[in-house]
Image (tube, rainbow, N blue to C red):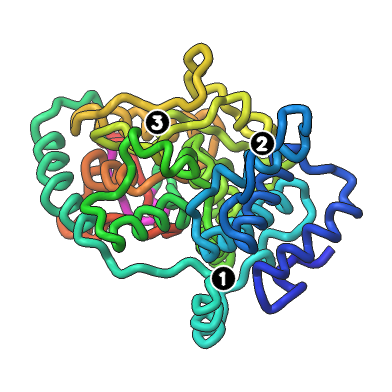
Amino acid sequence: MSSFAEASASPFHGAASFIKSASSTSSTPASTAQKLRVYALYKQATSGDAAGAQPWAVQVEARAKWDAHSLLRGLSSSDASARYVAEVTLQARSLSLASPACAWQPPSPSAAAELAGLGLLPPVPAPLPWIRHAADDYYLPRWRAARALAARPRAYKVVPAGAPGAVCLHLVRHGEGIHNVLAAEHVRKGGTTPPYAPENLGEYPEMVDAPLTAKGIGEAEANGLRAKTPAPTHLVTSPLRRALDTGLISFGVPRDGSFPVLAHEGAREAFFSRNLCDLRRPLAVIEKEYPFVDFSRIPPDPAGAAHVGIEGETADSILDRLYGLLDFVMEDCGERGSSCAAVATHSVALFALTNGVLHFPEGAGREQWGMFGTGELRTLWVKREGA
């Protein structure tokens, strides 16, 4: 079956056409939750906010549709369109209905401008002052101090590619997520900080375990067009879906269990407060969507939890957690007899790993390992100190 990107010059209308054909030809039907997500995003993109009163409880289907649509109240048509394309892409991939490589193609500059004007591609905002301020004035000094003062049981060094006994790490940050777009819009409208605090859940419910946008999917697919040498033997990933999906797409991971995918709590985002966008959905929900992923290294949900977060962290606890993640990756590679692994995670976690955990030899250019861009993939070789 051809991908929906080939069905129309418009990603949104192409996705809608794809859904109509897939619903009648797919041997693996979408779940009710998947159908409701697609329905609600389509209605929000084409009709705006849910109108009228909530249907009676006995009107089960009508009420479920209205409730799903109502949750998106206030979401702009352009954002709903981008999310619709992203949701259809991910569902098509999960149901093996389309090739990941052709579900999104970077448009030409003129086409990109046209699509952005139609509200079919999310805008690309200029760098925001709070991002620069947070990285330069808050995080950096504390991680440097923590690295200098904290006693570590072991250290890892960055070595030349192919060095004996070294492990190759392909590190990738998740592609653009819905939360990135919503935060940028909030700041552009006059907000002084991103709306990531838990008290913003009522206004931004879609930030919880935010999915990739169409642009984010494209960023991951662009990684797949580049040769990754050597090829990784397995993927270690954050359990949050924006990182998980980026890793699966970037490394062309099949969804049949033939390529090991390990979700690890240490690969979740690192942060000093409880960010709304970093809340994890219940494991039962995630495991159903990704039955081929090993979630045994993710702590169980608290009883009755609708969303699962982590407590605020200190600079030392962030570094301890990232040391633990690197310990696991290196030991796991040793047990597998592997010399290369892929790691899909988040921006602050990657910054802590490359600037606070790894030792770069003099002149090796650690200063070049700043914050990763969305969907950015970098490769380095790592070895235990003294090994």
Query: Mark 1 or mark 2, which has the lower sequence index?
Result: 1
Alpha carbons under labels 1 and 3: distance apart: 35 Å
What's under tag 1, amino acid-wise?
A: Leu
The three-letter amino acid code for the residue at tag 3 is Gly
Numbered circle sitting on residue 266: 3
Q: Residue at x 59, y 62 (%)?
A: 81
**Res. 29 in view:** yes
Residue sitting nearer the eye, 227 or 71:
71
Depth check, mark 1 against mark 2: the one in front is 1
The span shown in magenta is 156-163
The answer to whether residue 240 is left or right of residue 271 is right
Between 55 and 145, the one lying in front of the other is: 55
Separation of residues labelled 2 and 3 (CA atoms): 21 Å
How many residues crowd mark 3 within 10 Å: few (<14), some (14–19), many (20+)?
many
Tag 2 residue? 289
Residue sitting at 85 percent across and 43 percent down?
28
